Image (spheres, rainbow, N blue to C red):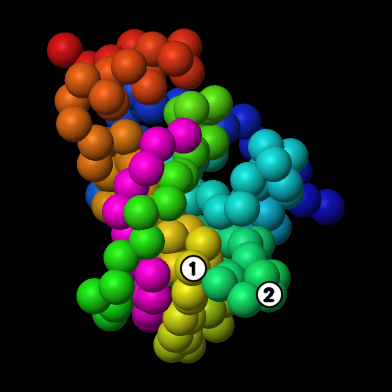
Amino acid sequence: MADARPITYYGMPVLHRRCADVTVFDRALEDLIEDMFASMYAAKGVGLAANQIGVDAQIFVYDCPDADDVRQKGYVINPVITSMSDAVDGGTEGCLSVPGPRAAVPRASLATVTGADLDGKPITVTGSGYFARCLQHETDHLNGTLYVDLLPRAQRDELLREAGLTPPP
């Protein structure tokens, strides 16, 4: 049975560096992905990167609506954004690792991520609308970037304080 794990918050080192590539595809990896879904649902999120539960691994899970309000659910191991539309969505986003506040972050309105499945076989996931935002947000996480890092410093620091977190020096 899957276990929900605690969410790591902004400032924890695992969130601020690129996560390690996954090289072993086994039952432990499958268990981790199940725990990631449980953790995401427990925290009421639509996406979760492994480092958000303290795991240094290139994996994210999602359960998120696309531009047509169709629910997309899955995971990507070792994700790489391979294409993004020129069209930009200026919507807002939040983050389980910065609980509470949201901010407008420009993101491509269509994004494609490639990676691997649990058998190590190649997969491609393309998302539109909010799901495209989720794919970009979670891939950023695995590369050590949180959405607040994309904002001007003063706005980032204000959002971190609003979330009860300490801005970096």
Asked whether residue 107 is drawn in magenta, I would say yes
The span shown in magenta is 102-114
The label on residue 70 is 2
Q: Secondary structure at mark 1?
A: helix
Residue 82 appears at what percent x and percent y? 28, 79
- Residue plotted at (16% across, 12% down): 169
Q: Is residue 29 visible?
A: no
Q: Is residue 34 left or right of residue 62?
A: right
| Residue plotted at (67% across, 37% down) | 43
Task: Give the amino acid at mark 2.
Answer: Val
- Residue 149: horizontal and vertical position, in percent? 25, 36
The residue type indicated by label 1 comes to: Gly
Q: How would you rate the neighbour count of disc 1 (Cα within 10 Å): few for under 14, some for 14-19, many for 20 or more?
A: many
Observer-nearest of 94 and 75: 94
The residue that disc 1 covers is: 129
* Residue 114, placed above or below residue 138: below
Query: What distance separates the C-alpha of mark 2 from that of mark 1?
Result: 11 Å
Who's the residue at 53% across and 36% down the image? 96
Question: At numbered mark 2, what does the secondary structure look like: helix, strand or loop?
Answer: loop
**Mark 2 or mark 1: whose residue is earlier in sequence:** 2
The location of residue 62, given as percent across then percent down, is 59, 61
